[in-house]
């Protein structure tokens, strides 16, 4: 059995012992490939970092190991390319020159679920560690337990849409173990065990409302769309897109209108494309939706809001752009649900208010932003946990901005820090890796703000937070997040080479990568900041307000 070198106390999604089992159980994987994979347990690493860790392995070499104790870079690249070809690894950042290599989350997810099923076939298949993991080093916050427990007799589903699951299972072709996990949630709902906790309860209620009570002719198609939203909530964006397309294809094959079915749901092609780093395609998909009046005010509001979100993130906040779209969407919401009784409509109303608050925060209207956030909070408090997690990040950023403007109240730093802590806890409850990583970047920017504006010492774990956020954004494939990580580090270290000379070269490379990603996504504010950094303008103390995805 191949073992680990004790290189870090970081616990990724599975614990080390379970991860070792996963690697050793992988079929047709050479000793050298397993050795490389084990080294990458600790997160994204570059070639020389991987080499160093392989060379430092303390375990005696077996007879079938390479005789050359000093593995060359070219030989290591061949190993890594083989693992990439198998779908186990991927590259990030400087993909052509000096990339980071990391283990792909789908491989981690499927292999971990497989082991859990073998070890305890009737137990809880979804430990939060596979979805969120203990992402900090050192003392950990308690991880919220999974509330939906799989219950007995999973295959005895005597209800009207058993065929929907069978169609899903056949078309998606997931490993049997992962299907068991999905079926466990599916069975729970139909045995009446709708959980009350955060995202599990929301997903279950959405299933009952969107799938189970729909016309039998549409149930199979709706099943796919519901799963697309489920995968999106777990930050499995490629899987969400694949299932979404299967649902669209199934609807068209049966002469159903997928747009009509999706008109009453929050999931959309534009939302998924936005998380797949295709902002241009996402905006176009949203705009196409706004041009049709066939599907009612909620669908129109959803698409207007989506287009406005893209514009807000990209800095396109002129009077006819993001703010105008949010305002129009809010008016349509009033028509769609005058009694404020539909949870999907209410969630969208809260999201519009939250994004309007972000717009006002960016334009310096701090009181107006606070008013919008308070209004959003009054909406989200009715069990709309996803919106609440996003709002906490916004409120933390508002407190950080206020601390650096006007009288510069230092106590607002404490409020911002508390809100970011609360945001991380909320991210765990809804199983959102993205939200957790966004909170980590927010904490790093808060630390930079406190250091520059109030001469507070930098926290000792700030580099760990950068590393963990980068790790997460690599795992979920979100280039927006990688750009934010690199840009934040450059603002802290690269702009102050005299204070941090050992960081200058590394952050220079990261600044280049942040520029590439920002240009590809069309992030105008980030590109403007990068230009100021490169021109040696005095930017070290800039607030750099964050607009979260």
Image (spheres, rainbow, N blue to C red):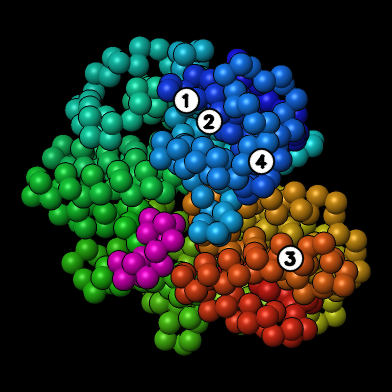
Instruction: Give residue 128's position: percent from left, percent from top.
Output: 57, 32
The image quarter containing residue 247 is: top left
Question: Quadrant of residue 372 in the image?
Answer: bottom right
Tags 3 and 2 touching, CB below 8 Å: no
Residue that label 4 marks:
51
Q: Quadrant of the N terminus?
A: top right
The magenta stretch spans residue 281 = yes
Q: CA distance from mark 1 to mark 2?
A: 6 Å
* Residue occupying image coordinates x 48% and y 86%: 318
Mark 3 highlights which residue?
A: 505
Callout 3: helix, strand or loop?
helix
Q: Earlier in the sequence, mark 2 or mark 4?
A: 2
Is residue 351 in view from this perspective? yes
Q: CA distance from mark 3 to mark 2?
A: 31 Å
Whether label 1 touches label 2, CB < 8 Å: yes
The mark that comes first in sequence, 3 or 1, is: 1
Q: Is residue 27 magenta?
A: no
Mark 2 in CB contact with mark 4 (< 8 angstroms): no
Eye-nearest disc, 1 or 4: 4
Q: Nearer the viewer, residue 19 or 14?
A: 19
Q: Which residues are magenta?
A: 272-285
Q: Main secondary structure of the magenta part?
A: helix
For the residues labelled 2 and 4, the Cα–Cα distance comes to 13 Å
């Amino acid at each position: 059995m191949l073992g680990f070198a004790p290189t870090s106390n970081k616990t990724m999604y599975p614990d080390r012992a379970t991860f070792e089992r996963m690697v050793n159980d992988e079929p047709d994987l050479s000793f050298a490939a397993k050795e490389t994979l084990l080294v990458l347990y600790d997160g994204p690493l570059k070639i020389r970092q991987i080499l160093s860790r392989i060379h430092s392995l303390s375990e005696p070499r077996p007879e079938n190991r390479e005789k050359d104790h000093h593995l060359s870079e070219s030989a290591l690249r061949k190993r890594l390319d083989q693992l990439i070809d198998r779908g186990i690894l991927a590259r990030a950042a400087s993909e052509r020159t000096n990339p980071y290599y990391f283990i792909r989350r789908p491989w981690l997810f499927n292999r971990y679920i497989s082991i859990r099923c073998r070890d305890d076939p009737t137990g809880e298949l979804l430990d939060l560690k596979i979805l969120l993991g203990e992402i900090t080093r050192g003392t950990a916050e308690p991880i919220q337990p999974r509330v939906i427990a799989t219950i007995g007799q999973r295959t005895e589903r005597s209800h009207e849409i058993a065929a929907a699951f069978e169609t899903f299972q056949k078309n998606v072709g997931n490993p049997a173990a992962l299907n068991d996990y999905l079926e466990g949630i599916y069975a729970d709902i139909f045995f009446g065990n709708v959980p009350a906790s955060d995202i599990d309860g929301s997903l279950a209620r959405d299933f009952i409302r969107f799938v189970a009570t729909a016309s039998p002719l549409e149930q199979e198609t709706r099943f796919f769309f519901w799963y697309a939203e489920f995968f999106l909530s777990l930050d499995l964006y490629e899987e969400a897109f694949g299932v979404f397309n299967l649902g669209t294809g199934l609807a068209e094959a049966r002469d159903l209108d997928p747009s009509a079915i999706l008109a009453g749901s929050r999931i959309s092609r534009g939302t998924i494309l936005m998380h797949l780093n295709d902002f241009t395609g996402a905006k176009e998909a949203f705009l196409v939706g706004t041009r049709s009046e066939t599907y009612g005010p909620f669908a129109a509001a959803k698409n207007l809001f989506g287009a406005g979100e893209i514009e807000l993130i990209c800095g396109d906040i002129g009077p006819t752009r993001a703010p105008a779209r949010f305002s129009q969407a809010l008016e349509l919401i009033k028509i769609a649900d005058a009694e404020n009784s539909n949870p999907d409509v209410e969630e969208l109303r809260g999201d519009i208010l939250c994004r309007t608050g972000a717009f006002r925060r960016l334009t310096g209207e701090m009181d107006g932003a606070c008013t919008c956030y308070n209004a959003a909070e009054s909406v989200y408090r009715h069990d709309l946990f996803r919106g609440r997690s996003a709002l906490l990040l916004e409120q933390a950023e508002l407190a950080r901005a206020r601390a650096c403007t006007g009288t510069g109240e230092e106590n607002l730093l404490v409020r911002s820090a508390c809100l970011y802590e609360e945001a991380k806890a909320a991210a765990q409850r809804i199983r959102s890796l993205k939200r957790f990583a966004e909170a980590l970047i927010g904490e790093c920017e808060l630390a930079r703000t406190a250091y520059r504006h109030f001469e507070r010492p930098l926290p000792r774990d700030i580099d760990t937070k950068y590393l963990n956020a980068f790790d997460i954004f690599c795992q979920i494939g979100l280039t927006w997040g990688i750009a934010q990580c690199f840009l934040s580090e450059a603002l802290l270290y690269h702009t102050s080479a005299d204070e941090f000379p050992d960081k200058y070269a590394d952050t220079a490379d990261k600044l280049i990568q942040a520029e590439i990603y920002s240009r590809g996504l069309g992030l105008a504010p980030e590109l403007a900041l990068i230009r100021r950094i490169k021109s040696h303008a005095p930017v070290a103390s800039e607030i750099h307000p964050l607009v979260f995805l």
